[in-house]
Image: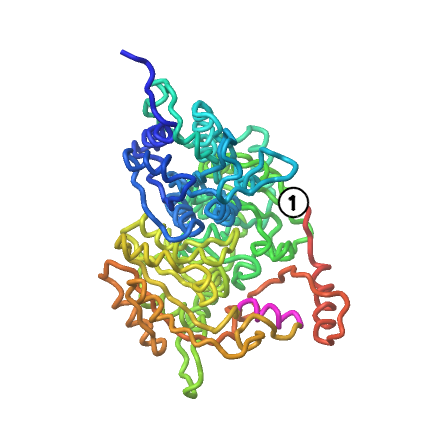
Amino acid sequence: MSNTLKLTAAQAMVKWLSVQMAEDGERFIEGVWAIFGHGNVTGLGEALHGGDLPTWRGQNEQTMAHTAIAYAKAKKRTRAMAVTTSIGPGATNLVTAAALAHVNRLPVLLIPGDVFANRRPDPVLQQIEDFEDGTISANDCLRPVSRYFDRITRPEHLLTALPRAMAAMTDPATCGPVTLAFCQDVQAEAFEFPVAFFAPRIWRIRRPEPDVTELAEAAALIAAAKSPVIVAGGGVIYAQAEQQLAEFATRHAIPIIETQAGKGAIAQSHPMNYGASGVDGSAAANDISAAADLVIGVGTRFQDFTTGSWSVFKHPDRRLISINVAAYDALKHGAVPLVADAKIALEKLSVALGDYAGAGANPAAREEWLAAVTAHCAARRLTSSGDLPLDVEVIGAVQRATDDTAVAMCAAGTMPGALKLLWQASAGGYHMEYGFSCMGYEVAGAMGLKLADPAREVICFTGDGSYMMANSELATAVMRRVPFTVILTDNRGYGCINRLQTGTGGAPFNNLYADCNIEAQPQIDYVAHAGSMGARAVKARDIADLEAQIAAARGHDIPTVIVIETDPSTGPNFNGSGAWWDVGIPAVSASPKINAAYAEYLKNLAQQRVIN
């Protein structure tokens, strides 16, 4: 019996991927999103047609990858998907999605076709030629946004490249996008692969134990602290440490505040959850941050929105501990590092701390905050026919119309900050792509989220700006019968950036359609547009009708798009809950408003503290 198997390189890749298993015995790579072209149709296309991996067709390479990334995020990085494209624009369309996955530390396998390894027909259709380097192709654009990059120029390269790819995607410290640029001629070449190469393999996601010295130092710092606070990041969810975090906070009387990625790890109803931190934070959370003498980050990068550009932690003796599986993140901003799996680290810290209890927090402040949120999100009585609902009223309507099975998801514009501040999430009831805050993620991401968790009601919030950037995967969701609800808030432009522009002294310019260099205000019929792709599409007359339409969307097997016009002038913050955000203001301007904004900027800059 032969100990080799003759296959094309593409056939070998598909066969190998189909037997790489997660810890529960299911495939780690659940399937492949594909748009075929001359760089992959005759190689990978043929292999996928005859192989065991499910293959799905999307509408755009970037949004296919967004779907795959959202799927991996919803699966807490225990599963991933692959995406294959042709060379040229198909491959470069992956760059934005790869950057999104890289920032968010999420696994996705990108398999763009590449130029001919043998170079005989060069230059081929869509080939990028570098005048000084013959090894460069368009796929090299993916190098800086990949955690692992390889170019397959010989079939036997798969013997090392594929295991390295899986190792990168399943390592909690290096997790991120992998690019295997697959030369199109090599895809079709045959090779005698060892039979043993195709033996099923289980990939276990390791849980690194903390270093004894680091653990002791972190425990000593906590034990000496009077008013510590926990900043819960996405690493809590990826480590599946939600229960350990809740128990740790409760036992040791340490309040929890949330990042965008960490929101939903602990239900808003938990008494130790004081809500969102930072720029888009709650008054309750930011007051705790200001008084904290020790900040304990758990699975967070301490992004500027979380820290108010390092201005919210005001205690003069403030120290910082960072529990993170990646040393790169654990060492940021002079933090005392505890490099370990979040679940194990919290368990061991709790043992080391014994009966230690911090000062806790003020439950009355928390309840006052939540009551204020409910009042703020209530529907107003509009005084004239020209009045439009506010985004916060839309959030309130969705909150009232859904239950704990709902997942609110979004990525860019007004809604991320508003939802972080105001959405009262159940456990697992929040999915935000805010590491890259990528416009156009929303519709594709909602499909990936629903595929990953079919039992939950997926509510996709998107503005008209993001919808216009990328909406075509609605058609894919219709074809595959993947139901979710899109709340499309139409404020006739980029309302969020317009408010940032005017709030920093600038004049309204090039954001809302009314302030653009155009001949006529666009009148876009989003209901007709979504309906043309097969989605169920309606327009809500007002907030009450929005609630009714959300209920009516349930029970359908295709996406529902609910359009509602909103007022672009008002953001989510209220009661002084927002913190400062460091956005560069012109130091010299002819505008008195900008000069005043710059003077205020200098005052805030003096509060910034980026190191312990």
166 or 249, nearer to the observer: 166
Q: Nearer the viewer, residue 29 or 204?
A: 29
Q: Quadrant of residue 82?
A: top left
Which of the pair 239/558 is nearer the observer? 558
Residue depicted at 36% across the width and 50% down the height:
58
Q: Is residue 499 found inside the magenta-colored segment of the image?
A: yes
**Image quadrant in which the N terminus is located:** top left
Judging by the rendered image, the residue that carries numbered circle 1 is: 333
Residue 93 percent location from the top left of the image? 48, 49
Q: How is the image coloured?
A: rainbow
- Left or right relative to 19: residue 502: right
Instruction: Give the answer, above or below, for where 42 lies relative to 300.
Output: above
The percent position of residue 544, horizontal first and vertical second, equals 33, 76
Q: Residue furthest front?
A: 121
Q: Given the current orientation, which residue lies at the most extreme top position?
A: 1
Q: Secondary structure at mark 1?
A: helix
Residue displayed at 45% across by 30% down? 167
What residue is rendered at 36% in x and 44% in y? Answer: 33
Residue 287 in view in this figure: no
Instruction: Specify whether 222 is left or right of 315.
Output: left
**Stretch in magenta:** 496-505
- Location of residue 422 in the rendering, given as x and y in whole percent from the top left corner: 45, 64
- Mark 1 packing: few (<14 Cα in 10 Å), some, or many (20+)? some
